[in-house]
Image: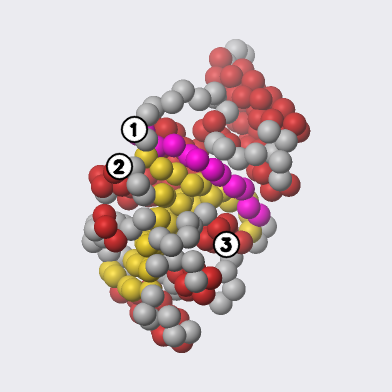
Amino acid sequence: MALSKRLCVAADFVRDGVFVVDVGTDHAYLPIELARRGRVRGILACDIVEGPLENARKNISAVGLDSIIKLRQSDGLSRVEPHEADDIIIAGMGGDLIARIIAAAEWVKEGRHNLILQPVTSADDLRDWLCDNGFQIAAERAVLDSGRLYTVMLVSYSGERRQYGPEYRYIGEISGATADGRDYMMRQAARLRRHANSLSNAAAVHPEAEQLMLTADIIERKARCGE
């Protein structure tokens, strides 16, 4: 029942002494790890279908943590009350689905909740959505897990719509100070260059291709400087 590296990073973002909600808990590996660390007051593990919840129930009972981890069938946060959550983890889903889950729970805009988000796809789109809707990414870490690079975001609501550089949607708050961070940034830059080249091949002059190349340059510079 070893926790994956990406979920370990998500666990590290959880504050001490809080109530945690884990959305899409599956086998409840993350709630079990948090309970074992002894840092949280309680955990509500949610999933949309009963099957994963039954697997979670068996795993929780096997390690004797029924008193601290409670289970609930819920579509996203639809059956979670604001007072039941301080830190909310939404991991292992596409960025578009994560955005829909957050958007459907207006109460997360109270400002006191931390959102710990781990998209497996569409991280760029999720960053755009967060920025456009008044959420701030306070911290972000890249992590290599089973040969694939993921990002984990620590997010809260401020109501402000800040302006960011063109590179932000691709790297957010990820820093080149770590090996995984540099690798993530360099891969994003390479992806942008491939896209720019494909656009240039389709048209003699393509303004978007030029902008993508400039953005790739910014990302590569930040990665090499450890920013």
Q: Secondary structure at mark 3?
A: helix
- Examine the rendered structure and indicate whether residue 185 appears above or below residue 48: above
| Foreground: disc 3 or disc 1 | 1
**Picture coordinates of residue 95, whole percent (x, y):** 44, 46
State the residue position of label 2. 109
Q: Which residues are magenta?
A: 133-144
- Amino acid at dot 2: Lys
**Picture coordinates of residue 198, whole percent (x, y):** 61, 28
**Foreground pick, 113 / 131:** 113
Q: Is tag 3's residue or tag 1's residue first in the polypeptide sequence?
A: 3
- Amino acid at dot 3: Cys
Q: Is tag 2's residue or tag 3's residue first in the polypeptide sequence?
A: 3
10 Å neighbourhood of mark 3: few (<14), some, or many (≥20)?
A: some
State the residue position of label 1. 159
Q: Please check the rendered image and state whether residue 142 is part of the magenta-colored stretch, yes or no.
A: yes
State the residue position of label 3. 8
Q: Secondary structure at mark 1?
A: loop
Q: Name the quarter where the N terminus is drawn.
A: bottom right
Q: Name the quarter where the C terminus is drawn.
A: top right
Instruction: State how far apart marks 1 and 2 are (Cα).
Output: 8 Å
Q: Place residue 40 in its image quadrant.
A: bottom left
**Picture coordinates of residue 158, whole percent (x, y):** 37, 35
Is residue 197 at least partly visible in the picture?
no
Looking at the image, which residue is at 60% across and 40% down? Answer: 174
10 Å neighbourhood of mark 2: few (<14), some, or many (≥20)?
A: some
